[in-house]
Image (spheres, grey):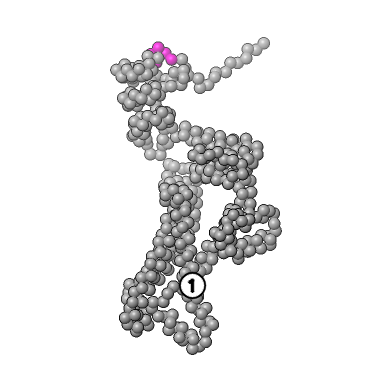
């Protein structure tokens, strides 16, 4: 009868020699003199093993960090003891001085192009955390259990079935780019149900029915907005708060805003008024519209109320997410710049209207000064220039965003050109860094 082959059990700590036991004991007790002597001996004779571990898997650095002995940690690092996961352990026990020491040591020994120590451990730990979150979703058996997981917030009371969903865990997963978690079928099914909650069965309807539903929302969006402000607790008011309806209303509202900007830039209100006037009336109106000190037009009032809404939206976002999260978003700066430009336009129009009225009251002939004879920095001219700049500002940045998509894809292909889809950090380091930079701007 054959004797079964006994396989060696991997990854078990080896038995310590007497010298190694003395070495670890000296480190644990903080005996600097003995530890220094043992380390110097090891440099000449390679005995004992200065990276040995005890039965609990603790090496000399771990013992020194547990004892919060900074001098011992420094001695071990200087004498060449492998740091391995010592940085992680220092962070875990909140030994700040050791963390700073190990980080400085890492910077000193690091060579360009080589991975930092503990990088593999960090990556493995990250994969384990990601997989644990995904496995947790696998174990959810009902939509209620899934809702409890996604709405968990340690700073707030526990989620109860039937309450409004905040999806705090899902937002956190999106922030940290946990793609497996976000793309999980259970989450996608829940998000789809929440998204179309205001329009049940939308995905199963024909294209013509979908077109009519979207068109109806587009035509009635002013009514929906007014209803939301006046009677938010009514049946229709609650439907307006559903994600898909909010998206459609916001989209059509912004399209309407763009159309108003285009009409105002073409002086559509003046052309509309002239269309219904007689020839004599058009001549009189032509003189009036060139007059200085005219009040804002209807279209300008609409734009003013839109800008007030944009400002209120930004303030609400700051209040909800915090100033830090708001400023981390590149589009927030774009929105702020646009709103500031429009506010400057309105302020200059008020100044121009006030000054021109005073001048006309003192000298009525100044009401019909040709535009080419106005002062170069007349507030109304400056306001019109800023208005044009505000109109094209976001359009230009939207175009730049498309360019970032293009250049990001080019640099990414240059970086990941090796077989197997690996990044070529040695020869294409700049491309690997640049495409991540482009992608960062795109994502924000």
Q: What residue is shown with label 1?
A: 298
Instruction: Name the residue furthest left.
Output: 33
Question: In the figure, residue 391 lies in which quadrant?
Answer: bottom left
Label 1 packing within 10 angstroms: few (<14), some (14-19), many (20+):
few
Per the image, label 1 sits on a secondary structure element best described as helix
Residue sitting at x 63%, y 54%: 198
- Residue 211 image point, x, y percent: 65, 62
Q: Is residue 210 above or below residue 104?
A: below
Q: Main secondary structure of the magenta part?
A: helix
Relative to 20, say whether 401 is above or below.
below
- Could you say where residue 232 lies in the image, as x and y percent from the top left? 57, 56
Q: Is residue 305 left or right of residue 112?
A: right
Looking at the rendered image, the quarter that the N terminus falls into is: top right
Left or right, 443 with respect to 249, comes to left
**Quadrant of the rendered structure where residue 428 is?**
top left
Question: In the rendered structure, which segment of residues is drawn in magenta?
Answer: 16-20
Q: In percent of the image, x 50 and y 49: which residue is there?
A: 413
Query: Which is more toward the observer, 157 or 440?
Result: 157
Q: Is residue 397 above or below residue 414?
A: below
Magenta stretch: includes residue 17? yes
The residue lying toward the viewer, choosing from 386 and 41, is 386
Q: Residue at x 58, y 64 (%)?
A: 223
């Amino acid at each position: 009868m054959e004797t079964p082959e006994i396989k060696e059990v991997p990854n078990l700590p080896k038995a310590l020699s007497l010298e190694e036991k003395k070495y670890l004991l000296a480190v644990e007790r903080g005996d600097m003199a003995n530890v220094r002597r043992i380390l110097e001996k090891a440099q000449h004779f390679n005995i004992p093993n200065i990276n040995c571990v005890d039965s609990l898997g603790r090496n000399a650095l771990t013992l020194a960090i547990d004892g919060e002995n900074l001098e011992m940690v420094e001695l071990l690092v200087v004498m060449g003891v492998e740091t391995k996961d010592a940085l992680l352990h220092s962070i875990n026990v909140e030994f700040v001085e050791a963390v700073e020491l190990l980080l400085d040591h890492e910077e000193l020994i690091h060579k360009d192009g080589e991975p930092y120590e503990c990088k593999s451990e960090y990556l493995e730990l990250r994969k384990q955390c990601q997989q644990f979150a995904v496995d947790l979703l696998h174990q959810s058996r009902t939509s209620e259990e899934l809702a409890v997981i996604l709405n968990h917030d340690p700073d707030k009371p526990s989620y109860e079935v039937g309450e409004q969903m905040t999806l705090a865990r899902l937002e956190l997963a999106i922030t940290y780019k946990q793609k497996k978690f976000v793309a999980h079928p259970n989450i996608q099914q829940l998000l789809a149900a929440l998204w179309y909650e205001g329009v049940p069965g939308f995905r199963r309807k024909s294209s013509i029915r979908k077109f009519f539903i979207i068109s109806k929302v587009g035509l009635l969006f002013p009514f929906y907005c007014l209803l939301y402000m006046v009677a938010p607790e009514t049946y229709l008011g609650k439907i307006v708060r559903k994600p898909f309806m909010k998206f459609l209303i916001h989209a059509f509202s912004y399209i309407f805003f763009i159309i108003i900007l285009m009409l105002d830039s073409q002086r559509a209100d003046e052309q509309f008024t002239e269309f219904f006037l007689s020839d004599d009336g058009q001549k009189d109106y032509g003189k009036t519209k060139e007059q200085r000190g005219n009040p804002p037009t209807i279209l300008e009032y609409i734009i003013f109320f839109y800008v007030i809404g944009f400002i209120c939206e930004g303030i609400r976002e700051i209040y909800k997410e915090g100033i830090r999260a708001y400023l981390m978003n590149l589009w927030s700066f774009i929105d702020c710049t646009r709103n500031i430009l429009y506010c400057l336009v309105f302020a200059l129009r008020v100044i121009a209207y006030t000054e021109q009225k005073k001048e006309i009251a003192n000298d009525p002939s100044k009401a019909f000064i040709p535009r080419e004879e106005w002062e170069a920095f007349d507030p109304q001219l400056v306001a019109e220039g800023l208005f044009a700049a505000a109109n094209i500002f976001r359009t230009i940045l939207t175009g730049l965003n498309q360019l970032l998509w293009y250049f990001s894809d080019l640099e990414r292909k240059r970086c990941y050109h090796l077989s197997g889809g690996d990044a070529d950090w040695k020869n294409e380091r700049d491309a690997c860094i640049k495409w991540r930079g482009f992608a960062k701007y795109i994502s924000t």
